Image (tube, rainbow, N blue to C red):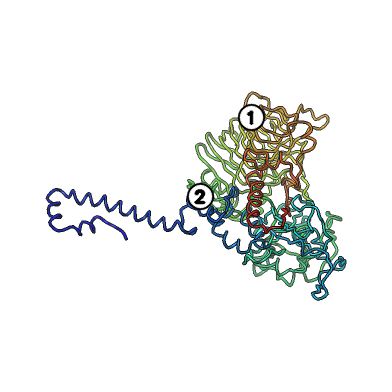
Amino acid sequence: MRYDAQSLYALLPAVHRIRDAAEDGVLQELLTIVAEQLNAIEEDIDQLYDNLFIETCANWAVPYLGDLIGSQLLHGAQGTLRTSRAEVANTIAYRRRKGTAAVLEQLARDVTGWDAAAVEYFLRLATTQYLNHLRPEHRCTIDLRQMEPLERLGSAFDSVPHTANVRRIASGRGRHNIPNVGLFLFRLGAHSWSAVRAQPAVAGDKRRFLFHPLGINAMLFSFPEPEKEVSHLADIANVPLPLSRRELSRRTGDYYGPDKSIEIVRRTAGGLEPVAIDEIESCDLSDLDADPDTSDWPPGHPTRVSLDPQLGRIRFPADEDEVLVRFNTGFPAQLGGGEYDRLATFDAEPVGFAVYPGAQGSLEATIAQLGNAGTVEIARSGPFRETPVISCRENAQLEVRAADGMQAVFQLGGDLVVGGGASAEVTLNGLLFAGGRVLVPSTFQGNPNRLQKLRIIHCTLVPGISLHRDGQPVSPEMPGLVVECPDTTVEIEWSICGGVRAVDTAVVTADNSIIDATSPDGIAFCAPPPNEPAPGAPLSLESCSVMGKIHTAALLRVSNSLLLAENTLGDGWDAPVIASRRQQGCVRFSWLPLNSIVPRRYRCHPVDDAESAMCSPAFTSLRYGDPGYCQLATPVPDALWRGAADEAEVGAFHHLKQPQREDDLRTRLDEFLRFGLEVGLFHST
C-alpha cells in the first residue's frame, strides 16, 4: 500500500488535529516525513521480493543469483552479446540439456555473438554396422556421383564418414573420434545491399550485369535464417556462408525471392518487376573473363535469367535498361559503411536539412540550397555518377550522410574537392567513393582554403581509386585522401581509406579504421606531391590496420594498431615506418616492423629478429572487396591475437574482442560439457 500524510493525519483523533491546527500544523508536517519513510521502506520490501527473481531483480543482484546456481560471469566483451541477466536466466533451462550438441551450439551463439554449428564427430565415423540396425546412408566410401557432400568436405556440414583420428581435438589437429565435439564459429557476417543498381559487365552491354555497385566480382553470401528451437541443430541455411552454384541450383527457393538472400528486379514498361523464381537458373558465368572487351558471349538459356553466386554475375536472355538487385556480401565487422545502424554518429539537431536526390538535381546544388551548412541526407544507395564540390561556409558545420541503413555509392569522374571558410567543419558519413580522390586543396574557389576540420565516419575511399573486375586496384599508387590545406584536422573513424597524403601543418587521427596502400611496400602516409615522400602531418592511430609505409612528422599516439609495412630495394626509405620527431609521442601495444624509426615503444611486437621471422602477420585477404579483407588468418600468434592493451587482437577489428569471446565460450563450455567429451573450436569463415 501507499502512505500519504493526509491519510495518516485523518486517523488521528479530532482533538489532536484541532490542537495541531492551532499550533501551525507541526504534527501534520511530522506525519509528512513519516509517510515518506514508510513509502521508502515499502518500496525496499517490494524490491527485496523482486530480487528473488532474475526477471525482476536489480542489476546488482544478478551476479549473486548467478553465484547461487554456479554460473560464472563472463567478459561480456561484445556489445551485441546477450546480457548477464539473460545468461543467468537461461542457465537452468540449458543445464537440463547439459552435454547435448544443441545446447553447446546455443551457448556458442549466446556467448560469442557469432553464428555457430555443433558437430558430434562420433556420428561421422566410418564404423562396422550392427546387422540389426543397418544404416544404408552411412557408407564407408565416398560416392563420387554425389557432388553436394564433396563440396562440403571438411566443413561443419561434412557428411562423409571418416576414419578415427586419435589426436586431440582441443589442439585443432584431430577431429573424428568418439569423444569429440566440434564447434564451428562463423566470424564473417552477411552484410546486405538493397535496391542497388547492377553494373554492366561490359560498357554498353544490356544483357550481362554484375551485382556489386563497383562493377567487381562479388562472392554472394546467404543471410542466415534464425533457429526457432534450442533443440534444433544448425543447418547450412542457419549460418552465413558463401553461396555455391550447386547449392543455389538445388535450393533456389531458400535463397532467392522476397525476404531471401538474393532478389533481382528489372524495369519494364509497367514499372519495376521482380524476376520470378521459375526464371532463375544457377550456372557458371566465368566465361566472361575469357574476352572481357567483347560482347560475344556464349548464348544462355533463351528464356531464363542466369545467375552466378560465386562471381556475382547475371545474364539476361534479352536487353534490360535497368536492373536493381538485393544481395549480401561477407565482412567481419560493421566498418566502412553499410546498411547498419549509424544513428549514434548523426548530428541530432542540424541547422538545416535536405534530402538528396531531390528537386535540386545534384548533390552540389542541394548543398548550395541549404546555404552550405546543415545536413544533406542521401536517401538511397545509388550508385551516383557525379563529382560534387563540397563547400561549407565559415563558422558553420556541414554533414553529408547516407540515411541510416543505407550506403551511398559515388562513382566519381575526378577528385571530390572539399573546402570551406574559417572555422568550417565538414562531415562525410556512410559514403563510398570510387573513381577519384577526396581532396582538401590549399586554395578553394579562388581563396585560401580555411577548412578547420574534416570528419570521415563509416566511409570507404576505395584503395587504388577504382577496381578492375577481378578486384585488383586500377591505380594502386594513388592515395585516397589528399590534404593540402594547412591547419586542417582530419578525423577518420570506422572507415576504409586508401593511402593518405597530408601536409605537415595538418593533423590526422584515425580510429578503428583501415588505411590501405594496396601493398605493404606502397606508401600509406606521407606528404602530398610534389614533396612526397617527405614527412606528412602528425599522425595518431587507435585500433587501426595500416598496410604500407609511413613517413610522418610525429607519431603522436599509436595504440592497439597493426602496421604492415616493408622496404623494397632502392625505394629510398631508411625504414618502413619513420617519425621525424621521435622525442614526441609513443607507440604502445602495437605490431610494427622491427627496424621502424619511431618514438619509445611500450609492449610492442616483434621484440627481436626471431619473433619477427616466426610471427609475421598473415591475413585471410589483403584485397579490398574480398570477404575476409584485413582479417587475421588462423592460427594467429598470440603477439597479434592478444597483443592489445586489453589482450584483444591488434588492428582495425580490435573492437570485436574476438579472443575474449573465445575465452568466454571456453569458460561456459566447462560448465555444460558432459564428462568424457572434448570440444574443439574452429573458425569456419
Q: Which residue is mark 2?
A: 353
- Could you say which quadrant of the image residue 138 lies in? bottom right
Earlier residue among tags 2 and 1: 2
Q: Front-most of 387 and 606?
A: 606
* Residue type, label 2: Phe
- Marks counted in the figure total 2
**Quarter-wise, where is residue 166 in the image?**
bottom right
Residue 230: x, y in percent? 62, 65
Q: Secondary structure at mark 1?
A: loop
Q: Of tags 2 and 1, which is closer to the observer?
A: 1
Looking at the image, the residue that sits furthest to the bottom is: 132
Whole-percent x and y of residue 543?
A: 64, 40
Q: Is residue 16 visible?
A: yes
| In the rendered image, the vertical position of residue 551 relative to residue 65, given as above or below | above
Look at the numbered disc 2 and give the secondary structure of its residue: strand
- Whether residue 209 appears in this view of the structure is no
Instruction: Locate residue 108 relative to residue 70 in the image: left or right.
Output: right
Question: Viewer-proximal residue, 678 or 10?
Answer: 678
Q: Residue at x 81, y 65 (%)?
A: 149
What residue is rendered at 46% in x and 58% in y? 52
- Identify the image quadrant of the N terminus: bottom left
Taking depth in this image into account, of 252 and 317 the one nearest to the observer is 252
Q: Residues within 10 Å of mark 1 (few under 14, many from 20)?
A: some
Q: Determine which residue is flagged by label 1.
A: 586
Amino acid at dot 1: Cys
Badge number at residue 218: none
Q: Is residue 658 left or right of residue 161?
A: left
| Residue lying farthest to the front in this orientation | 675
* In the foreground, 264 or 105: 105
**C-alpha gap between disc 2 and disc 1:** 42 Å
Q: Residue at x 61, y 42 (%)?
A: 493
